[in-house]
């Protein structure tokens, strides 16, 4: 295990800075040595860019990985899409000599070279493997007595052969990290179903992607939860902003708060919701603030 | 043989190479039954796998772009066929033949200009400062030399040319 560098990606710093701050506060509180990865770009996102041109996708990902290699730190991602790109690219570099040589021919032009000597981690996977639910719970200052719909998202765990986090049909590690905070992870049908955003579908066929989201939200609504917790800002956007878009397009109103795991963890570690950007996530999260306030008064 | 025909033959060869794994498909339908998009759109992934290497018509198939790349089909395929990987390779051939959604082109242009698919905006700049972060994150938004490196690589890989092809 090496020290970490924090890979921000696009959506977190540029749309959900509360997740960035929550992540940094949590890492510091848990005494995890993680520094900024200065000068990183888009991972680049697997949906469109990998579809368009694998060489470009692999080369830009490699430049990001090189920045972390130069610090001799493993990369920490807080997004399933970034994890998908960077972990897959890193594996290609380590296992495929031709890909590595091809990428380095491009990187040479900017005076860089990829070696393939670090690992790429996702914060959920990292916290589970390196800390574990028990150690996490020992840091909890505020037990969260709430019902949570955990949304794993597709690329945290699939393709399972590459990820090595077990079977995707009934995983448990993310749920365990949620219950470690005092919360209840509520089972619901189609829990492992896609949010509907990936693969470039949200950007080019929003109405179709929202149909998938609506189906998922309807299952979550039936489960009567206080919030949805995700591990990916793209799922976060689709399940959060998607509620407003669904209301507009389908006249179906959902009122479910959406949090990234780092924000839920931050609450449990004792940080106020305002510091974690929870009130700025989506409008609907005001409801979640009310739930928290009510809990404080009890 | 005309240049056009030569081009088509090369494209056909590329499609066949990309989808050779699909020849092992037994058309059991587990992929379609597992597809979240297939429940709500016209995407029939079983049919796409069936026609994958047959002709160049697949390059214009709108269903190629309805896949969210969730990997359910690939995970559950009893023949262990790399369905999503095949689909991604066929998408790339389709893009090289000029089939680019206008919305996807915009996302690509963002990457070409800012180094991010979703660049920062005024609202988030203000929001970052409000919650106590620096106005610009520690990315190529802040480091111009880093952005120049990204742009050099995008040119070196031919991505700029790919996106600018057939631009209307």
Image (tube, coloured by chain):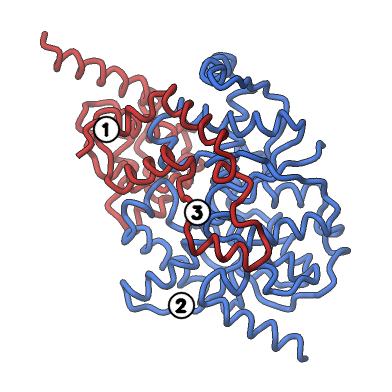
Chain colours: A blue, B red
In the picture of the structure, the residue carrying the numbered disc 3 is B120
Q: Pick the quarter of the image with the N terminus of chain A.
A: top right
Q: Which mark is residue A198?
A: none
Q: Residue furthest bottom?
A: A298
Q: Pick the quarter of the image with the C terminus of chain A.
A: bottom right
On the image, the x and y values in percent for residue B107 come to 38, 45
Residue A253: image quadrant is bottom left
Under tag 3, what secondary structure? Answer: loop
Q: Which mark is residue B51?
A: 1
Within 10 Å of the Cα at label 1, are there few (<14), some (14-19), or many (20+) other Cα atoms? some
Callouts 1 and 3 close, C-beta under 8 Å? no
Q: Identify the residue at image location x=52%, y=29%.
A: A58
On the image, the x and y values in percent for residue A130 come to 81, 47
Callouts 2 and 3 close, C-beta under 8 Å? no
Q: Are marks 1 and 3 on the same chain?
A: yes
Under tag 2, what secondary structure? Answer: loop
Query: To which chain does the residue with label 3 belong?
Result: B
**Cα–Cα span, label 1 and label 2:** 40 Å
Within 10 Å of the Cα at label 3, are there few (<14), some (14-19), or many (20+) other Cα atoms? many
**Cα–Cα span, label 1 and label 3:** 41 Å
| Residue A78 seen | yes
> Which is closer to the viewer, label 1 or label 2?
2
Query: To which chain does the residue with label 2 belong?
Result: A
Q: Which mark is residue A254?
A: 2
| Residue A222 seen | no
Query: To which chain does the residue with label 1 belong?
Result: B
On the image, the x and y values in percent for residue B141 come to 54, 45
Q: Identify the residue at image location x=61%, y=79%.
A: A288
Along the line of sight, which residue is nearer the eye, A276 or A226?
A276
Residue A295: image quadrant is bottom right
């Amino acid at each position: 295990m090496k020290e970490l560098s924090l890979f921000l990606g696009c959506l977190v710093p540029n749309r959900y800075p509360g997740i960035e701050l929550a992540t940094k506060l949590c890492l510091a509180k848990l005494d995890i040595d993680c520094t900024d990865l200065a000068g990183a770009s888009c991972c680049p996102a697997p949906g469109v860019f990998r579809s368009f041109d694998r060489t470009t996708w692999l080369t830009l990902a490699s430049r990001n990985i090189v920045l972390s290699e130069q610090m001799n730190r493993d990369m920490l991602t807080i997004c399933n899409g970034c994890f998908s790109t960077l972990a897959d690219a890193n594996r290609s570099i380590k296992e495929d000599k031709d890909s590595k040589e091809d990428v380095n021919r491009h990187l040479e032009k900017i005076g860089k070279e990829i070696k393939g000597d670090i690992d790429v981690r996702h914060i959920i996977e990292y916290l589970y493997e390196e800390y574990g639910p028990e150690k996490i719970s020992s840091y909890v200052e505020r037990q969260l007595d709430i019902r949570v719909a955990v949304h794993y998202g597709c690329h945290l765990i699939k393709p399972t052969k590459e990820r090595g986090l077990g079977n995707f049909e009934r995983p448990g590690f993310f749920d365990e990290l949620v219950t470690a905070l005092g919360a209840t992870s509520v089972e619901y049908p189609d829990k492992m179903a896609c949010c509907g955003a990936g693969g470039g579908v949200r950007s080019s066929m929003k109405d179709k992607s929202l149909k998938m989201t609506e189906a998922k939200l309807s299952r979550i609504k039936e489960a009567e939860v206080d919030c949805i917790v995700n591990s990916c800002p793209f799922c976060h956007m689709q399940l959060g902003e998607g509620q407003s878009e669904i209301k507009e397009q389908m006249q179906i109103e959902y009122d479910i708060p959406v949090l990234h795991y780092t924000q839920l963890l931050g609450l449990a570690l004792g940080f106020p919701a305002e510091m974690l950007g929870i009130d700025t996530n989506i409008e609907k999260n005001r409801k979640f603030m009310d739930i928290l306030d009510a809990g404080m008064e009890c | 043989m005309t240049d056009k025909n030569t081009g088509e033959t090369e494209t056909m060869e590329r499609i066949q190479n990309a989808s050779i794994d699909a020849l092992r498909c037994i058309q059991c339908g587990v992929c379609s039954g597992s597809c979240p998009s297939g429940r709500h759109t016209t995407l029939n992934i079983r049919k796409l796998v069936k026609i994958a290497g047959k002709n160049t018509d697949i390059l214009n198939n709108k269903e190629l772009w309805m896949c969210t790349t969730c990997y359910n089909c690939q995970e559950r395929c009893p023949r262990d066929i790399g369905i999503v990987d095949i689909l991604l390779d066929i998408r790339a051939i389709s893009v090289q033949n000029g089939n680019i959604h206008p919305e996807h082109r915009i996302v690509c242009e963002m990457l070409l200009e800012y180094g991010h698919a979703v660049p920062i905006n005024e609202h988030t700049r203000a929001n970052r400062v409000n919650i106590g972060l620096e106005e610009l994150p520690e990315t190529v938004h802040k480091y111009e030399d880093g952005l120049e490196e990204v742009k050099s690589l995008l040119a070196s890989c031919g991505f700029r040319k790919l996106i600018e092809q057939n631009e209307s």
